[in-house]
Image: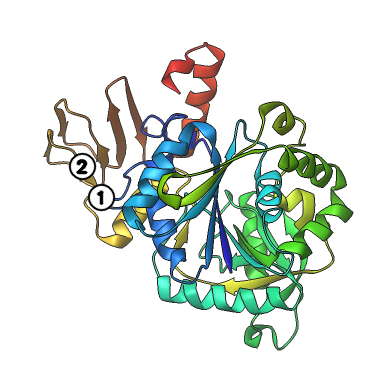
Amino acid sequence: MTTIVLSGGGGTRLWPLSRQALPKQYCDLLNGPTLFERTIKRNIKFSDNLIVAINVSHFDIAKSQLEKVCPDKSARFILEPCGRNTAPAITLACLALDPDELVLVVPSDHIILDEEAYEDAVNRALVAASLGYLVTFGLKPEYAETGYGYIEVDSDEEAAEKEFHHVRAFKEKPDRATAEAYIATGRYYWNSGMFAFLAGKYLNELGKTAAEILMASEKAWKIARRSILPGGIGEVITIPQEEMFLIPAESIDYAVMEKSQNVAVVPCSFGWSDLGSWDAIWNIREKSGIEAIEGPSIISVDSKRNLIIGSERLVALVDIEDLIVVDTPDALMISRRGSSQEVKKIVEILKEKGKTHLL
């Protein structure tokens, strides 16, 4: 089985710590291994092969972090000169594989707390994938979340006993009332962005639903530059920029999963989060018992329920509650807890003002 690790995201929702040059998957957000390192360690135990799809500018740090956690494991790196979303990244990786190879696709910037439950879900997904299904992982919703897409499954009396379900529809991020209605039916799951399938099955389905992506990816793959890493620890495949730009930018959900008639979902619950905001970081730290105040020069007086990540200068808190403070050498971000999803507006404003050096 081959694990494809998707690591091309920019991670600007965790600005100002996560930047384009150092996205969140490579940052130390949880007082320990980075999200990228955790992803490698979590999946390497049942993977024969490892493919990492990344932006070319992040190759050195990805290679360094992979060697840190798995010094004896070889990997194949697919270097993208520009991001074209998940469908092209997965397509390029599958073109490197035998059509009958089982594939597990995982993002590198998510957290999973219950690895035993995760391994069970992966095993169930691989069974369904070996039967020819395109499989997605559906997280049992814990509350009416409006920041995730949802997956609707067929309903029947035996649904709770099934290892996997047929997918009826993929749903966009809903408003709160719609999310609450979804949860009440018991037929909806959060869309995790993780997948399993046979490499050839995915490419065949892509040819039916988004042939332009497959054809452009095949052309780019044929002329990609290939080199072996020193010591024979892996291979680097660099996609030419001009050919990469010609591949339509599309997610795997839009390009394949929402259009295919052969999609299954594996229901699971393993302490998952996409860590898409500073509030999500707070929640995971709280669940994991990780200190919420981090930094060598932070003083807190009569303050509580704050997430403070500091730089080298002194950060002093006096009688404040429920704040998120992220201090870096060139930017300070302060948000009320519960509002950190709005950080994306700061990023948009910085782009409008041409302050791209802060992104």
Residue drawn at 66 percent across, 51 percent down: 90
Q: Position of residue 202 (x, y in %)?
A: 76, 60
Asked if the residue at tag 2 contacts the one at tag 1, i.e. Cβ–Cβ closer than 8 Å, the answer is yes
Question: Which residue extends farthest front?
Answer: 231
Vertical side of 241 occupied by 163: above or below: below
Vertical side of 94 occupied by 197: above or below: below
Residue drawn at 47 percent across, 35 percent down: 58
Front: mark 1 or 2: 1
- Judging from the image, what secondary structure is the residue with disc 2 in? strand
Quadrant of res 135: bottom right
Residue drawn at 60 percent across, 73 percent down: 267
Vertical side of 158 occupied by 40: above or below: above
Q: Mark 2 = which residue?
A: 294
Return the mark for residue 31.
1
Residue type at mark 2 is Glu
Return the mark for residue 299.
none
Task: Give the mark, 1 or 2, whose residue is nearer the N terminus.
Answer: 1
Q: Residues within 10 Å of mark 1 (few under 14, many from 20)?
A: few
Of the 4 image quadrants, the one containing the N terminus is bottom right
